[in-house]
Image (cartoon, rainbow, N blue to C red):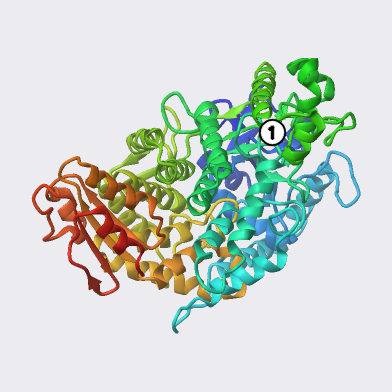
Amino acid sequence: MRNHLAGEASPYLRDHAENPVDWYPWGEEALAKAKAEDKPIFVSIGYSACHWCHVMARESFSDPKIAEILNSNYVSIKVDREERPDVDEVYIEAVRILTGSAGWPLSVWLTPDLRPFYGGTYFPPEPRPGLAAFNRVLLAALHYFRTQRPEIDEAGNRIAVELNRLSTLPGHEGEMDETPLRRFYEQRLEVFDSEHGGFGVAPKFPNPTDLALLLRLSPHPGFDQARSIVELTLHKMAEGGIYDQLGGGFHRYSTDTIWLVPHFEKMLYDNALLAQTYAQAFEVTEEESYRAVAEETLAWMEREMLLPGGGFAAALDADTGGREGAYYTWTESQVTGAVGPELARLACDFYGVSAQGSFDGTNVLHTAIPVEQILSVHHLGIGELWPKLGEIRAKLLAARNRRPALRRDDKLLADWNGLALSAFARCAVALDNRHYLDVAGTLAESIVDRMVAGSEVTHFVRPGEAGVPGQLPDYAFLVQGLLDLYAADFEPRHIEVAVALADRMVELFSDPEGGFFTTRSGSGLPSRIKNGYDGAIPSGNSVAAMDLLRLARLCGRDDYERAAAATLRRFYQTMLSYPPAFSLMLAGLDLMLHAGTEVVLFLPEPSPEAEAMAGLLASNRDDYRTAVVIRDRQPDELTVRLIPLTHGRTAAGKRPTAYVCRGQTCFPPVHTAAEFASLLVSK
């Protein structure tokens, strides 16, 4: 007998439709039932690419005895954290308060009025060292709920108060300066792994926003090792098993310190952020290996994650047939069978394949052996090696493609697709690739058509049903993507949509005391979280602050600048205390502290000089520049309305004309690439 999840749009929820547990989705029906019957609520939160979520589903949620306990005594709710980040955010913080740590699968026990009184993560079916059996936990929580209800209610109230306290941040009235940026650099330097790259010990995460901030800071005095930290980390990740050596793209994180054995799921957000980071490193260093990784990552996104109706899917699963990583790993005999005996030794040496293996008797492909050693051992010249490696890679990939396909989570999420939009738009400029600009333009049209109505954003579209309302990250990430697309193609319609969404974002989520709540008011949840933590996904507050600063400079909106500054002030003391948790918000602080350059470039007619000036603007990277390009003699009506920088400015006849201002100084317009270059590089 099916439960209430069979008709859900989320693949993760549908996975549990055949469980004997009488699951409900999060919604009014389940919540009303709990109140009417005065039953505790058991909430299980996970996502489709979560390995241990699948394990707990097989072990416990498929067990009729456990189902009987839940069905008789609880209202059981299954939540896809990617579909309902608002629910997940509140209850994962609650479990952190209760236990000191949290993750997925997330298990939370609630009173009928949604206040948490117990929680944890994975519970096994039988007791293990440090872990109680799930059935015992269910019965103990039920006994506690029935016999000590006043204490239960009081515990729920205390947690609700603590949740609200977490969002009550100390303000900052004095000057804001570079102190948090310098502390960020010093603390990252302290935990930097100078042998393998990255920060700290296992498990090791890519931390793309940390790396991007270090690249941003690297030209400034006092950040001497910032660039080398980034370069070593990017090289080591690209050589390791965390990077898919055959198909491109990155797995979730490394379970060891050397980037070898990953947690194998692939997430859209990780790859969108890392593609940008590698492209940014290419801009700074001009090293082709960074370009290659960015291009291979974007190619993977297009090949395996692009949905038929437009937009990108959320994730690829880690498991095949219940075994994590089976799709990606190899034995020696499998490699030999795929590439043939003549290439087998070279393939195994290059990709680190051995008889004993590196993961459950199999091998995670990696390229940690120096090329010079490969050349010496196999008596090859460099010109002979690359064609052979290309043949090996093609044969291994063809063999892998014949394996049972990984399951794809086809949810179209507004926030994550906003990150993908930024990735393709920024890489179009950094890598000078017109195709990426076309992908970004098509993606923007798809998101706006399907997920934006006026100034309302839908987080997740449910076919035939009302969608999940957009939360702060949906608005902030889409605005960021549109700003990045404008910086690539200079179409003012992107700014028009961005401004409408930014206005609505401020209206829905801003706190009069500074900063933004992550969720809308009136949700019924026990707290509204104000989160600035830049983890695997940047925080909505960080992206919103950066968006508003960029829009303030482009559109002359003082109200945006005030809202951004209020956000940075609200988090400033916390950034001082633990700067590594706020890498993207620190980038916003860095932007606010630098006035930057304003450029308006008119290109009325195609000419070698015009294209040279456009090329200079695209290739001369500047994190603090606000730029407008108009391919006509004067700005169109929409540009004039939205962008005051263009007021009173036109091209000088048919000649390309650049207006440059820095600080409080505007320079005379220039008409040649040489003159324009001198203004761009001078500080």
Q: Is residue 553 above or below residue 105?
A: below
Residue 155 can be seen in this image? yes
**Secondary element at tag 1:** loop
Q: Position of residue 464 (x, y in %)?
A: 41, 27
Q: In this view, does 220 lie above or below 621?
A: below
Q: Where is residue 542 in the image (x, y as percent from the top left)?
A: 48, 60
The quarter of the rendered structure image containing the N terminus is top right
Rendered image quadrant of residue 552: bottom left
Q: Which of 544 and 210 is in front in this view?
A: 210
Q: Is residue 133 left or right of residue 284?
A: right
Residue 330 can be seen in this image? no
Q: Nearer the viewer, residue 113 or 331?
A: 331
Residue at the image position 15 percent from the left and 45 percent from the top: 604
Rendered image quadrant of residue 181: bottom right
Residue at the image position 26 percent from the left and 64 percent from the top: 557
The quarter of the rendered structure image containing the C terminus is bottom left
Q: Mark 1 points at which residue?
A: 318
